[in-house]
Image (cartoon, helix red, strand yellow):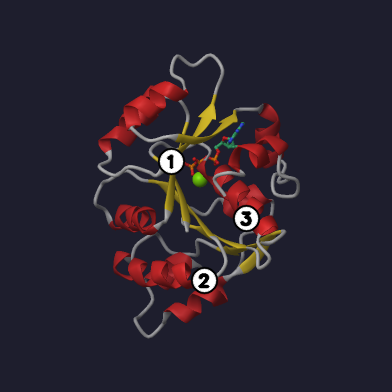
Amino acid sequence: MISCWSAKGGSGTTVVAVALAMILGRDCERGSVLVDLEGDVPTVCGVPQPDGPGITDWLVASPSVGAAAIERLEHPVATGVRLIPCGRRSVAGEQRVPLCAEHLARDERPIVVDVGRVAWTGEPDDLVRRQFVEAATTSLLVTRPCFISLRRALAIPMRPTGVVLIEESGRALGRTDVEDVLGVPVVAAIDVDASVARAVDAGLFASRLPAPFGRALRDVA
Ligand SMILES: Nc1ncnc2c1ncn2[C@@H]1O[C@H](COP(=O)(O)OP(=O)(O)OP(=O)(O)O)[C@@H](O)[C@H]1O
Ligand SMILES: [Mg+2]
């Protein structure tokens, strides 16, 4: 299970999570599963929000709704990728995250979770996100080389296993600064490129993954 998260909004987390799920979905015979804790995955994939319940509904459901029900939440969202959508509720129900994580860990398919922004507030929403980061075998902080973003990440007493750096030319901070400050390796670096934003805006990102994403994220996947 790979969890993608950020310390600051708009870092590129959802785009990276979708790209990883697509690479894994292509490489693994049984495809991959993408869990959306934020609600933006369908938009990035250029598909409508699925009708019906999602992971946020399962998390606050009664104990009689067991882990097997998680599989019934899945929808195809891109080639080789099945989505467990965010659902209709606000993010809560941290008591049920371990059961969910245990169930996902037993799945033969690789799982990617778009955790969204972790703020370490202690609110139910934040406790759920944190646990999805802590339960992951690989947790990836997606960040730009941005002072505000790095300060926020440093204030969180939890380190990712790796950083996906969304590089912007002209920034004062670079890869080495990010690694020095966070004490975590940059495992992939992706340039900010207007063609990526255009593909996302047009709903075309998931129909043809831009080549730089494939190259940068292949080793992570
Ligand atoms: N490598 C890139 N090059 C250019 N634009 C990008 C790149 N990655 C993401 N973007 C754009 O940046 C914006 C934010 O991306 P995304 O939604 O993935 O970030 P996020 O961290 O998930 O944001 P949020 O905190 O709202 O969940 C989007 O408009 C997206 O198209
Ligand atoms: Mg997002």
Q: Which label belongs to residue 151?
A: none
Q: Which residue is nearer to you in this view: 87 or 214?
A: 214
Q: Quadrant of residue 59?
A: bottom left
* Residue 110 pos. (x, y %): 55, 61
CA distance for labels 2 and 1: 23 Å
Amino acid bearing label 3: Leu
* Residue 5 pos. (x, y %): 43, 45
The earlier-in-sequence mark between 1 and 3 is 3
Q: Which residue is mark 2?
A: 107
Q: Which residue is mark 3?
A: 24
Please name the residue shown 32% across and 42% down the image.
159
Please name the residue shown 34% across and 55% down the image.
134
The earlier-in-sequence mark between 2 and 1 is 2
Q: Which residue is nearer to you in this view: 183 or 10?
A: 183
The earlier-in-sequence mark between 2 and 3 is 3
Q: Quadrant of residue 212?
A: top right
CA distance for labels 1 and 3: 18 Å
**Label 3 secondary element:** helix
Q: Is residue 180 above or below residue 201?
A: above
**Label 2 secondary element:** loop
Please name the residue shown 37% across and 35% down the image.
184
* Residue 199 pos. (x, y %): 71, 39
Q: How many neighbours does mark 2 have within 10 angstroms: few (below 14), some (14-19), or many (20 or more)?
A: few
| Left or right placement of residue 202 versus residue 171 in this view | right
Q: Which residue is mark 1?
A: 162
Q: Is residue 45 above or below residue 100?
A: above
* Residue 157 pos. (x, y %): 25, 42
